[in-house]
Structure formats: structure tokens, C-alpha cells
Amino acid sequence: MGRMWTLRANGIKVPGGKVFCLHRLPEGSEMKGIVFGVDIAKRVFQLHWVEPQTGEVVTLQLKRERFLEHFANRSSCLIGMEACGGSQHWARSLRKLGHEVKLLSGRMVKPFVVGNKNDAADARAIWTAVQQPEIKAVAIKSEEQQAVLALHRMREQLVKFRTAQSNGLRGLLTEYGEVMPQGRAGIKRDIPGALGRLSDRLPAIVIDTLREQYARLGEIDGQISQIERRLRQWQREDSATQRIAAIPGVGLLSATAAVATMGDAKAFKSGREFAAWLGLVPRQTGTGGRVRLLGISKRGDTYLRTLVIHGARAVLTHSKSPPEWLSELVKRRPKNVAIVAMANKMARTIWALMAHERAYQFGYVSRPA
């Protein structure tokens, strides 16, 4: 018997792909359900859990086809996964089987990885992290919400393509003395004339290729406009997006992205928690009881945070009647600080409208409950 315990401690694999180790549960503790840590991949999934009756630590590899089958006949349990590609799909599928699923940010899981990084270590780290009460889980989105985010991602990619295309044309024309102005409007206006002037100096094959590349800019513009029309159509059919769009500084992109990214608004306790989740609150560093505030944390969804900050900048720069507190803040603090403060307030307002299902009221003053 002593020899078998030595094999368990050394992590020797047994038939079936399982590894058993001694794990003693605290006396008097009761497990409502088994906690699983799952490291997902394209084909092979790594599982880690502790059997509550025996205290055995189990690690198991499963093929993609057998993953849901493993949980189909189990009683309700808590399953932790890292938020990555495919995790939303598996979270929805496991929820349909009656399990509780928590998606964790990779940044939250990394501190719990012990030793060399591999699938088993990652699954064990996820199993440990999912049981920490202070770690905030990533929202599990519906297929409709993910579809809207897919439109945003494709639009964002097209914008990058358009920028790269414009910069490439700008650099090529500069080599021949044709300097284009900054901005898309200027390059669209001046490129046809520049190509006309260069047509007598350069071979026709080069001019024809440059015209084709310039025409591609128009094609990308059309594709971006088509995606925006589809987002606008979805906005007309979604009441939450319409309520959010009434907030000054919140437009089509930020409204649809906020609804799709947030998921269930009641998953956040308050607007402050949602603003912190977006990375719009200061980082902190402290020791010996002294706490020092730094710049904003920049955690959470970068895309949505960027949209909200751009909207706040538009309120400060272009609004005819910006909030009085914002105008006063600009007088004593840098402009970017005031913009982030406005973005923080916008994020809190977005959460309040979604969580309480209310319409936006200009000049509304919140009162403590």
C-alpha cells in the first residue's frame, strides 16, 4: 500500500489517461458540486478536478468529440475555462447541460501557473483561479451578441486594411514627388490628379496598377458602409441599444458594441464595477498603508474602451453645451484626464440604463438607495 501511495505522489499515469494524487479535503467541508478546470484547444482538451469523496486529483485529456459527452451525465458542477477562441461556444453548450460556467481572463489565470507551462499546468491553474472569490468572470454572450461583435471585428479589420492601403499609396506617390495631404478626404481628392500628371512619366503598367490600388480604397469604403448599415438595422430592433444611443457621446458603434460586449448588465454590481472592468479607473500601488493612484488601468475590452473615450472626446470638443462639471474640470486638470473622467461617467450611465431598463434623462441626479 505504501508503494502505491508513492506512485500517486510521483504522478504516474494509469490506463485511461488519469493521474491520481493524494488530496485531503478540510474536515467538515461539503462540496455542492465538483469544480473543473478546463484548458481548451483546437482538438485536445485538458481537464483537472478533485473527486470530493476520495480526494483524488484527476487530470484527463479528452478529444474534442468527447468533451460534451464527459459532462452530459454529470450532476451540476462548476466549470472554469480561460476566455479564448471557442470558449463562448463551449460555455453556452455546457450551460445547456445544466452546469455553471465561468470564463476567466488569461491575466487572472497566469499567476496560478506553477512550474513549466503546459496543458496540465494550465488546467490546474484555471481550477485554482475559478475558486477565488475576488476574480471577475468574463460575461458569457449569446450567439446574437457574438454576431454583432463579429460585425465590429470585421469592420475594425477593414479599417486597418484601408489605412494600410492609403499609407502604401501615399508612400509610393511620394517617391515621384507627389505629396498627398493628411486624411482620407485629402488623399481621395488629390490622387486622381497625381496619377494624371504621372501618366506621361511612368510606364502604363505602373499607372494601371496604381489606379487599381486606388479603386480598392473605394471598395473597402463600400464594405465598411455596408457593415454599418447592418449594425444600424440591428440597433433599430434592439431597445437597449436605442436607450444607450441617447447618451451624449454614444453613437452607433459604441452603443451596439456596449450591449454586445457587456452581456448581462446585472452581472456587474454597479456602474463603478463596469467602468473598472473597462479599465477606466486608476491603477493603485501601495505599501505600509499608503496608497498612490497611477494612470488608468486599461484593463478589459480595448475596443469598447477606445470607442467610449473617443465619444467622451467628442463631447468635450464638439458639444455646444458640455456638462458644467466637465468644463470646470478642464480648467484645473489636463484635457486627457477630463476626457477619461467623462468616459468613466458614460460607462456608468450605460450600465445604469441597461441594468435598470430606464431611458436616458438629461440632467438626471442619482440619489443613494
Image (cartoon, rainbow, N blue to C red):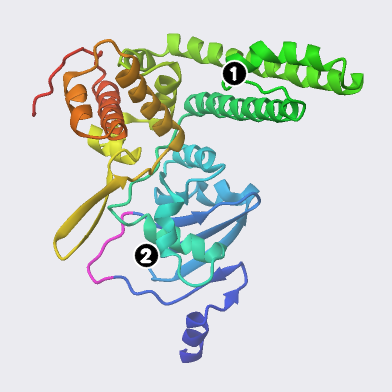
Horizontal and vertical percent position of residue 279: 34, 41
The secondary structure that most of the magenta stretch takes on is: loop
Q: Nearer the viewer, residue 269 or 183?
A: 183
Q: Are marks 1 and 2 in contact (CB under 8 Å)?
A: no
Whether residue 187 is visible, yes or no, is: yes
Horizontal and vertical percent position of residue 300: 39, 41
> Secondary structure under badge 1?
helix
State the quadrant of the C terminus.
Answer: top left
> Secondary structure under badge 2?
loop
Q: Which mark is residue 52?
A: 2
Compared across the picture, whether 12 is left or right of 49 comes to right
Q: Residues within 10 Å of mark 2 (few under 14, many from 20)?
A: some
What's the magenta region? 26-32
- Residue drawn where x is 85% and y is 15% of the image: 199
Horizontal and vertical percent position of residue 108: 39, 54
Question: Which three-letter amino acid code belongs to the residue tagged 2?
Answer: Pro
- Residue drawn where x is 87% and y is 15% of the image: 200
Whether residue 270 is visible, yes or no, is: no
Residue, far left = 368
- Residue drawn where x is 72% and y is 26% of the image: 169
Question: Which three-letter amino acid code belongs to the residue tagged 1?
Answer: Arg
Q: Which mark is residue 184?
A: 1
Q: CA distance from mark 1 to mark 2?
A: 63 Å
Is residue 357 shown above or below 157?
A: above
